[in-house]
Every structure is written in C-alpha cells, then in structure tokens.
Image: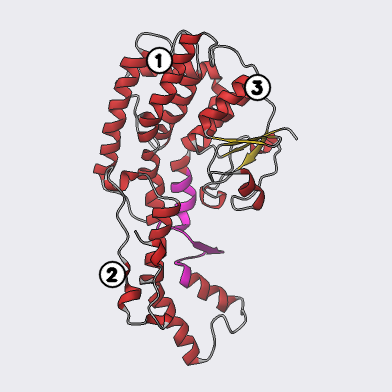
Amino acid sequence: MGLELYLDLLSQPCRAVYLFAKKNRIAFELKNVELFKDSILGTKVPGAEAEGGATHPSGSQQRKETTRVKKVPILKDDTFILSEGTAILLYLSRKYNTPDHWYPSDLQKRAKVDEYLSWHQATIRSNAPKTMWIKVLIPLLTGQPLPPEKLQEVMDGLAMALDYLEGLFLQDKPFLVGSEVSLADLVAIVDLMQPVGVGCDIFKDRPRLVEWRKRTEDAIGKELFLQAHELILNIRQHFTEEFNKVNILRKVPVLKDGDFILEESTAILLYLTRKYNTPSYWYPPDMKKRARVDEYLAWQISTIRAGTSKILWLKVRPPPPLLTGGAAPPTLPSPAQTPMSQEKGGLAQGGATCGGCFP
C-alpha cells in the first residue's frame, strides 16, 4: 500500500502538505476529508478527481482508524500513521530526499527553519485562521454576524505578528531564512492566504511582504499554488452566490423542493412526513397523540437542544477563543440552572441532568 494523505484544502496545514508533495513529485493517494460538506460549499477540493482517490466519509470507520487525533492533515504510509502538518512535512522531506533548500542540511540554516516553524504556531497560526471563522463560518452556523470589533481584535494581533515576520525573519532577504524558499515560507504563506480568502487585505502597505509573497508563489509554481488555494480564495463566493440563494437565514438544514425552500429542522421534518406519507407513528394522525409530539418538539428547542449544542461547541469542536476576544469560552450553566432541572421532574420523571458534562 502506498502513501495516503488525508486532506481538506480549506485547512492551511493541509494545503502546505499538498503543495509540498505535489511540488516535489511525491506519489500519493489523496483522501479528501470534507470538514465542511460539499452540500454547503457547493464544490470539491481541487485536484481530488485528478488524484483519483476514493474518499471516505468523515465519520467512516476507516477514517476513525486512520485519524487518531480526529483532525487533518493525516499521513498514512503503509501501517505508519502521522498527524500534525509540520511533522508530516519533515517526514516527507526526509523520506523522499527532497531538495536541500526546503529543510537545509546545514545545521544553522535548519535551526532557523525550526525557529520559524515554532514561532509561527503561536503567532501567525493563532490569528490568521480566525478571520475565516469570524467572517464566514460562525455567521453561517449561527445566522448572525459577529460584531466588527471581534474581527478588529484579530486583525490587530495579526498586524503585530506580521511586523515581527518582516522585522525578525524576512528582513532584507528574499525568503524567510535565506536566499531560497524553505518549509518556513511554505507554512507561512498558506496561513496568510486564509485572511486573503475572506477579503482581509493583510498585505496592504507592506511592500516587502508583497514581494516575498510573489517570490514564494513563483518558487512553488503559480498554477499549483492557485489550484491548492482555489477553494479558500472563492469561499465567500460559494456562500453568497450558491448557498445564500436558498438560505435566507444563513444556516442549515435547508430543504429545496423545486422552487420551494424551507428552513428549520422541525418544519422540514413535518413537511417530509406529510409529502411522503410516512408511517403514522412518526407524526400520529390522532389529535391528542399529535399534540403530544408537538408539545415535546416545542419544549425540546429551549431545553435539550439549548444544552446539548453548548456541550458540542465547548467539549467536542470548540471555536477559537475569538468569540470572547481571547478569553475562555463562556461556561455552561450548572445543572441547577438548566431548564430541565427547573422543570420539577420534567419529561424525564426525575429531572435527570447530564451531570458528567458540566464543569
């Protein structure tokens, strides 16, 4: 079995791995992991068909076995599995003996690449990706835009990081650690394309960075670079021109039946039961039984759903700390404060709460 790379090109570390492997003609099978489904974005990862790799759904057993840390990128080389973008890049450079300029054999030059890669994680990486969450993803998921000051806080942090990038690393050199492109430049440029893709002009009034960007893109290959960044550079277009045509409230699920568009999951479920004459136990014709179903559906939205959705965000896939301007995310209410516990006994005849899920 050959080399497999599990990638989503919306992810900047995935783009770095993809570009490095393609640029260095490393043969691999692309396993397209769709972190944000094609049904929402209306497109596929560039190059997926060209690689010819059959993909595995995000929740499939094969993906679970491969992805130990439940994120991308993931490298699978026979039975060897590796996560973390930087570790994958270093592994590929060593195994495939890529040109020395990527990760120099010279002790001091290599140390400078290592220095940048470590610095990058807590500075560029901690700020640049948040722009996509603020401007596109969180408004999509919540149906509400975030206050402008949230974006400004992130942009201020990113501006400070770019000052250091120019003054500490780039200086007057063609590339970040010398006269040739390295892994430092590759990792930096893919992260900086994230804010560019959502309309943040981070290169404005930074002529040295503009020239560095052009040199880096040219060194990678302009056509390859644009292919890898096609999705992120068009992400706003996908949401505004495709998804938002049918999505008035800017959230999912959305049903489109011919010219008829419907939002809100409960309304969609009821519509489907009526149109397709599903078995009566789903939504009983008996007036009193149906009323009981309606009663629960109304109660559930402000109780069960309000609590479980917070658990998902805080304990499974929390957004970056941008929602609170860098502070810790808002805490869940204690069991005593939840609507379930306030409803004496509630529907569960005992007022059970998810005690193990609260801090």
Could you say where residue 279 lies in the image, as x and y percent from the top left? Answer: 62, 81
**Label 1 vs 3, first from the N-terminus:** 3
Return the mark for residue 211.
1
Q: Is residue 286 left or right of residue 332?
A: right
**Depth check: 85 or 289 in front?**
85
Q: Which residue is mark 3?
A: 95
Find residue 20 and report its image quarter: top right
Mark 1 and 2 residues: CB-CB less than 8 Å, in contact?
no
Could you say where residue 295 lies in the image, as x and y percent from the top left? Answer: 41, 82
Colour scheme of the picture: secondary structure
Q: Which residues are magenta?
A: 238-266
**Mark 2 crowdedness (10 Å alpha carbons): few <14, some 14-19, many ≥20:** few
Could you say where residue 45 lies in the image, as x and y percent from the top left? Answer: 58, 39
SS under mark 3: helix
**Mark 3 crowdedness (10 Å alpha carbons): few <14, some 14-19, many ≥20:** few
Kind of residue sitting beneath label 3: Lys
Image vertical order of residue 182 relative to residue 4, above or below: above
Q: Is residue 191 left or right of residue 134?
A: right
Residue beneath the point at 54% across and 37% down: 9
Magenta segment includes 169: no
Q: Which residue is mark 2?
A: 337
Q: Quadrant of the C terminus?
A: bottom left
Residue beneath the point at 62% across and 16% down: 98
Q: Is residue 221 left or right of residue 77?
A: left
**Mark 1 crowdedness (10 Å alpha carbons): few <14, some 14-19, many ≥20:** some
Kind of residue sitting beneath label 1: Glu
